[in-house]
Every structure is written in C-alpha cells, then in structure tokens.
Amino acid sequence: MLPRPLVGALAAVFALLNTLFWAVPLYLAAFARIVVFPFATLRDSCNRAATRFAEAWITTNNVALDLLHSTKWIVRGLDRLDPGASYLVNSNHQSWTDIVVLQRVLNRRVPFLRFFIKQELIWVPVLGIAWWALHFPFMKRYSAEKLARHPELRGKDLETTRRICARLRGTPVSIMNFLEGTRFTQSKHDAQKSPYRHLLRPKSGGFAFVLGAMGDQFKSMLDVTIVYPLARPTFGSFLNGRVPLVVVDVRERAIPAEMRLGDYAGDPAFRLRFQKWVGEIWDDKDALIERLLNEHAGASLAKAVNA
C-alpha cells in the first residue's frame, strides 16, 4: 500500500493533468460553437460535444480515484433516474468532497450537473472558461446595501439569471443547489442555533431564486443525502484516501406547482409556505442522516482500523 501523502499527491497531479487534457477539446468545441452560431443544428452539436468531454473528464477522474483509493461506496436510489429529464438537485453540504461525490454518483445518470456560479468566478484559470463553455449559469447577486442605494436594481439578478438559463431551454439539464449555502461546521451550527442535529438552517431564498428562474423546466427534485460515517472529510483527506466509506441516498421528490412560480421576495404568505415546504424536507433529511450514521458507523470504523 502506498503512503497516504503519496496517494494524495498522485491523485492531485492526475486531477490537474486530466483537467488540462479535457480542457483542450472542450475549448475547441466552445470555439466551434461561436463560429457556427447562426446554424442552430451545428451549434447544438457543439454543445453536446462539450458536455460529452466534461462527462469523460469526470469518468476518468473516477477511474483514477478508484485505483488509488480503497473507499467503499454505498449508493441508493439511482435506478429510476432519467438522463433525458431535467432535475433540480439538492444536497446537504459538509466538504468540498461533496462535489466530487455528486459528480461521481450522478454522472451520465442525469444530465450533466451544473451549478449556479458567481459571475466573478469566470476568471478562475482553466475552469472559468470551461464553466462558460458548458453553459453554467453565472449570476450576479446584489447585496442588501447596494439594493438600498439603488432600488432600481431589485429583481435584476433574477431577470439576468432567467435570460442566461434560457440558453438551456430545450436541453435536459441538472442544476445543483446546496440549500445550506455553506459547508457544515459545528461552529456555524452553534452560531445559527440550528434546530437540526446534522444540518445548518436551509437558505430558502436561494432555493426559491433557482425555482423562480427555471422551475417550469424541472421534472422533479433529486434530494441527495451524503453521509461520511466515520468523520466529515476535508478535501485533502479525501485525496489521501482517508475516507473509508461514503453513503449516498438519492430520493426523487415532486416539486409542487405553487412552489415553482411564487414571488418569494414580495409575497409574505408564499414565503411562509415555501419555508414550511423546505423545512419538511430538512426534517426528513436530518432524520435520515441520523439513521444512516447509526447503520454504518460500526462498519466504517472497522474498515478504517483495518486500512
């Protein structure tokens, strides 16, 4: 068995080289799309090619991690997913590792997973242009202070996001949203006085923002619960292969029609109904995490001791 630091170094180097490798055909597909922009059929072909390159990038990352790591994966709820449908994907959030987990579990089982990204992140080397090429929804959010000074900007962020998301219409899409808005830590949990044992308070406003922009396109919501029975890993510990077990539960939930089109910011009654709906989802998720931890903690500990 290779030393853990060496495993982590190999995993990091491979991920970097793999990203650079697949960025080349992805950039070429994006350039071709610009050239053939007036021709819808050719433009759509370029979009599909870019997506296939991104899916291949994830697949090769997964293969490398399987070769380097001895992590056991227990995944439930993938049997009825439809790669031709559009989904809003929701998950609890504990670590940057969650993104790798979601990509691994859902890659090629649902449409390519996209995230809402802050507009400033387009300048991230290599990945920024890749996100743009893959039609990730870049959004510009205004602070409460700026809106107070410039009330004419109120609602502009939603209008901009809707316009950007219109590019994805007619194409199956999966949009990822972390309802907690940030990674779970015990200090954040305590500061919030969260009523949940394993979760931070959900940020319903951001969730409503996504549904307001694209709600009529989603078939349903995929409610993903990620559990690391031994301990919440850092991304570094994951690269080093120090995560003995990952448990993922995927549940498809209907999105009530009234939750797709309401005005969260301007309608207090709708806001209360929306928060109640999200709260029920969060109650279920908190109880599920507790059950999964109790179910798998012993096996995970034994695996870690024997590793």
Image: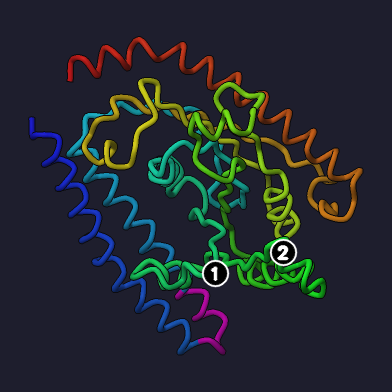
Q: Quadrant of residue 203?
A: top right
> Where residue 233 sits: x, y (%)?
35, 33
Residue 183 colored in magenta in the image: no
Camera-nearest residue between 45 and 240: 240
Q: Main secondary structure of the magenta part?
A: helix
Q: Is residue 107 above or below residue 4?
A: below
Part of the protein shown in magenta:
37-46
Pick the quarter of the image with the N terminus. Answer: top left
- State the residue at coordinates (52%, 53%): 111
In front of the other: label 2 or label 1?
A: 2
Q: Residue type at mark 2: give it.
A: Glu
Q: Is residue 43 located in the magenta-colored stretch of the structure?
A: yes
Q: Residue at 30% across / 14% down in the picture? A: 301
**Quadrant in which the C terminus appears:** top left
Give neighbour class at mark 1: few <14, some 14-19, many 20+ (Cα, 10 Å): few
Q: Does residue 92 appear to the left or right of 164 in the view shown?
A: left
Which image quadrant for residue 303? top left
Asked whether, in this view, residue 215 is left or right of residue 67, the answer is right
Identify the disc placed on residue 14: none
Residue 282 percent across, percent down from the top left: 66, 30
Q: Secondary structure at mark 2?
A: helix
Q: Which residue is mark 1?
A: 119
Measured in 3D between alpha carbons, the distance from the residue under mark 2 to the one under mark 1, in whole angstroms, is 19 Å
